[in-house]
Structure formats: C-alpha cells, structure tokens
Amino acid sequence: MKNTIRIVAIMLISLINFSALAADKCTGESITSISNTIAKGHAYNKHVIKGGQYKKGKVIAGLAMPSLPKVNSISTFGNLIKVVMSTSSDKKLLRGRKAYWNVSTGTIVIYDPSSKDCGTAFRPTKGKEYYNSVK
C-alpha cells in the first residue's frame, strides 16, 4: 500500500511539474493568437510604452514611424504584429524561431515558440541591418 501511494505521489508531482513547464511555452496556434500573445507580453511595455518606438514620426534607423498604423494599445500593437507576420519577408532562425521584417514601419517580429510570450516585436536601432544579422 505504501509503495502504491508513493508511486501515485510521484506521478502527481510529475504531472504538476509537466504542467508548469508547458505554461512556459508559447501556446499560440494561429498568427492571430501568436500576435496577440506577443502584444500582451514584454514587448508592449518595453518597446511601445517605455521605448516610445511607435509614436507617430519617431525616427529609428533613419525611418520615421508613419501615422498609420496607429499603435496606442495592446490591441493595436497586436494588429500591427499580425500584419507584419502575414505580409512581410521572413526567415528561419536558430532554435525553431522565425523573424519577420516590415519595411514601412521598420519593425521586426521574432516568433519564439519556446517563449511563454511567443517572442517580441520592436523597431531596432540598426533597422534592417539588425534583421539581416539576427540568427
């Protein structure tokens, strides 16, 4: 009986640990769910709010942020990320990641399925040179 209880306890602990690990990965299955998860992750606060990268006219790498698309909420940031992922050039990266480059806004989106926030999106200070160099 003690061995049975011990085995059940070990199995439960394993399941709990597996669930915790699974929550640390991107669970997005479509471009919409992935872009929304990226927008709700660290990228919005770091690059939109604190960095001010998406303010109209903000110049980064010689490119001014156009007046459209207007990025002033998590939702509009998610929409921009979705457009970048749907319509821009892309390349495969190491560790199963993928990068997307949008010329008109100077935005890179890096999809990372091993990250709980599915990746990041921002306007790199080196522009497309950064996109070209990311591995």
Image (tube, rainbow, N blue to C red):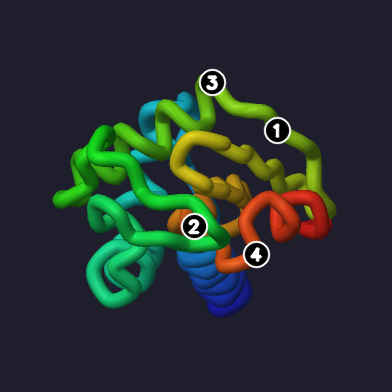
Residues at marks 2 and 1, CA–CA distance in whole angstroms: 15 Å
Q: Earlier in the sequence, mark 2 or mark 1?
A: 1
| Secondary structure found at label 2 | loop
Amino acid carrying label 4: it is Lys
Picture coordinates of residue 41, whole percent (x, y):
35, 60
Q: Earlier in the sequence, mark 3 or mark 4?
A: 3
Residues at marks 1 and 4, CA–CA distance in whole angstroms: 17 Å
Q: Is residue 100 above or below residue 108?
A: above
Residue to which mark 1 is pinned = 90
Q: Quadrant of residue 124?
A: bottom right
Count of number-bearing discs: 4
Q: Is residue 134 above or below residue 3?
A: above
Q: Residue at x 60, y 50 (%)?
A: 110
Amino acid carrying label 1: it is Asp
Question: Could you say which is closer to the camera, residue 21 or residue 61?
Answer: 61
Q: Earlier in the sequence, mark 3 or mark 2?
A: 3
Q: Nearer the viewer, mark 2 or mark 1?
A: 2
Mark 4 neighbour class, 10 Å CA radius: few under 14, some 14 to 19, many 20 or more: some
Residues at marks 3 and 4, CA–CA distance in whole angstroms: 21 Å
| Secondary structure found at label 4 | loop
User: In the drawing, what numbered circle is on residue 126?
Assistant: 4
Question: Could you say which is closer to the camera, residue 63 or residue 52?
Answer: 63
Q: Residue at x 49, y 29 (%)?
A: 29
Residue to which mark 2 is pinned = 123
Residue to which mark 3 is pinned = 87
